[in-house]
Image (cartoon, grey):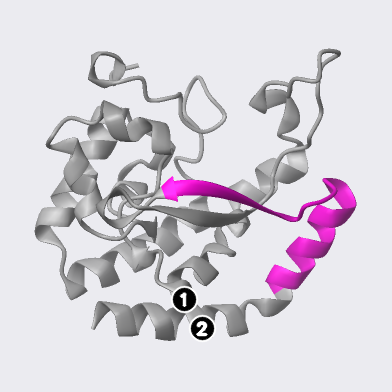
Amino acid sequence: MKRLLDLVLSILGLMLFFPFILLTAILIRLKLGSPIIYKQLRPGLNGELFELYKFRTMTDDRDQQGMLLPDHIRLTSFGKLIRRLSLDEFPQLLNVIKGDMSLIGPRPLLPEYLSLYSEEQAKRHLVKPGITGWAQVNGRNAITWDEKFKLDVWYVQNQSFNLDVKILFLTFKKVLISEGISNESHVTMPDFEGNSSSHN
């Protein structure tokens, strides 16, 4: 049932929002350059890696040594607008259609975090990752890692069709009011460095 819902809503979403997706892609090409979509390996169901798609929101500006500048410098006002409207997430509908992701589930994080999870936190990988999830509608990037993981695991243990519908509606509300996009001290979230630092 969930897979069918994922496929139907993802295909409808791509068709319905195609003009916005196309316009976003054109503006990114003009303002931020190529590639328009960036790909990154992320752990999915059972921790297996897949290639995540997102619209780019940062420039490739580098220092004299060729190293990328900090995120807050490379994230332009245009990039911030894309994130505030969650337009950067649209390419992940392709991940859902491919079966790498679901519409609803814990957000896919970085592969290097896998070895840092506690046994309880690792349960977030017992389901497919999602474009949005219980943690996203309960704080997104404005909550701590510990809070985020507890919400993810709660979803895994309590998932249902009704809960997924509730999360979808709450997601639209969050996008409209642009809530919880940034952490107090970071552009998105600080790096997760293990449970001893999950309160940072």
Residue at the limit of the structure toward the right, as seen here: 30
Q: CA distance from mark 2 to mark 1?
A: 8 Å
Q: Are marks 2 and 1 in contact (CB under 8 Å)?
A: yes
Image-quadrant location for residue 26: bottom right
Classify 10 Å Cα crowding around label 2: few (below 14), some (14-19), many (20 and above).
some
Rendered location of residue 8, percent (x, y): 42, 86
Q: Quadrant of the N terminus?
A: bottom left
Q: Which residue is mark 2?
A: 11
Which span is picked out in magenta? 20-42
Picture disc at residue 97: 1
Question: What's the residue type where badge 1 is placed?
Answer: Ile
Rendered location of residue 189, percent (x, y): 46, 30
Image-quadrant location for residue 192: top left
Which mark is in front, 2 or 1?
Answer: 1
Rendered location of residue 127, percent (x, y): 23, 59
190 versus 5 height, above or below? above
Residue in view at x 84 percent, y 55 percent: 29
Please say whether residue 39 is one of the residues in the magenta stretch.
Answer: yes
Residue in view at x 32 percent, y 85 percent: 4
79 versus 118 height, above or below? below
The one of 154 and 61 positioned closer to us in this rendering = 61
Q: Quadrant of the C terminus?
A: top left
| Image side of residue 98 versus residue 64, left or right | left
Question: What's the residue type where badge 2 is placed?
Answer: Ile
